[in-house]
Amino acid sequence: MRKELTKYLISMRARWRSVKDSLRNCLLNPCRNWRQRRLERARIPETQWRLTVARLPLLDGLNPAEQERLRDLATLFLREKTLEPAGGLGLELTPDMGPIIAAQACLPILNLGLDYYRGWRSVILYPAGFLAHHEYTDATGLVHRVHRPLIGEAWQRGPVILSWADLADPSHEAGLNVVIHEMAHKLDMLTGEANGLPPLHRTMAMQDWSRAFTAAYRSLRREVNWGRPTALDPYAADSPAEFFAVISEAFFEAPEVVADNYPDVYRQLQAFYRQDPLTRRASGRLPAAPGLPDPKSACG
Ligand SMILES: [Zn+2]
């Protein structure tokens, strides 16, 4: 009798603990649970995910757990962002487009989480490069109208604009990735206007970031000004914001170029993205990048 009573009490205690955990989970993680439910309902189908991975060599070194996490993030990305073709240009969305964009977009936040892409919803797709029209007023009050060809653009608290031809080109040159470039701008914009300083983790020191990036940026600008060949796309010399976006592309697509030429920056990016693509490359099929070629056109 006593044995049975003890057994009963143990089972009641276990049941109460499970109810308590569920309640705590519901109250403390409503957002996580909501995302989990959405994820279970709409995960990118296995076949489509495999096709996506096969088209993107930069995903090759991910281990099975990372692959699954990226698939989950890409699924949620497609649920939370809208993908729309630019009006009147004849681009039709097909089922393969979303996963190809989302997989590349979510690689930088693989170990950060989708909250890093908060505050914006829309991805606008152009069939190819496009002409951007911008207007700005300088310090003297003079209004300038600028028109320049772009393959991608990220707006503060606004959409990300991408050229499908450039992001889907399976033979895109090593080191260039317009999706990662624009997503890096979005991460940078989390602290306000893009300036090359995304929100650093508590374990990182602002002085270390600043020292590494300032030295690398100045060195690249000198090389560009003197007309010397550069290890990075020279567009990175345009501003600290572009330097961060371009070197983020290279960090994922051609990590050895960043590690060899800017080892301090590589370590900072490794700490920020919480990833080590150089180690990943050893087990993947990424082609070794001898150096980065000039880009076809610029990213905003
Ligand atoms: Zn840019």
Image (spheres, rainbow, N blue to C red):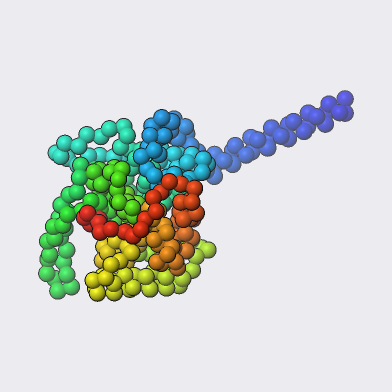
**For residue 72, above or below residue 255:** above
Q: At 78% across and 28% down in the image, what residue appears?
A: 8
- Residue 179 horizontal side relative to residue 92, left or right: right
What residue is drawn where x is 43% and y is 63%?
259
Q: In the rendered view, tell whether residue 222 sits above or below residue 136.
A: below
Q: State whether residue 103 appears in this view.
A: yes
Q: Quadrant of the C terminus?
A: bottom left
Q: Nearer the viewer, residue 231 or 29?
A: 231
Q: Where residue 168 appears, x then y in whole percent?
A: 29, 42
Q: Does 115 appear above or below 195?
A: above
- Left or right? Give the position of 254 relative to 279: left
Q: Can the viewer see residue 157 in this picture?
A: no
Q: Nearer the viewer, residue 174 or 241?
A: 174
Is 100 rendered above or below residue 227?
Answer: above
Percent position (x, y) of residue 222? 29, 74
For residue 298, what is the image quadrant?
bottom left
Residue drawn at x 14%, y 74% is 140
Q: Return the residue nearer the eye: 279 or 79.
A: 279
> Which quadrant is the N terminus positioned in?
top right
The residue at the point 54 percent across, 44 percent down is 28
Give residue 178's position: percent from left, percent from top: 30, 51
Q: Position of residue 80 (x, y in %)?
A: 37, 41
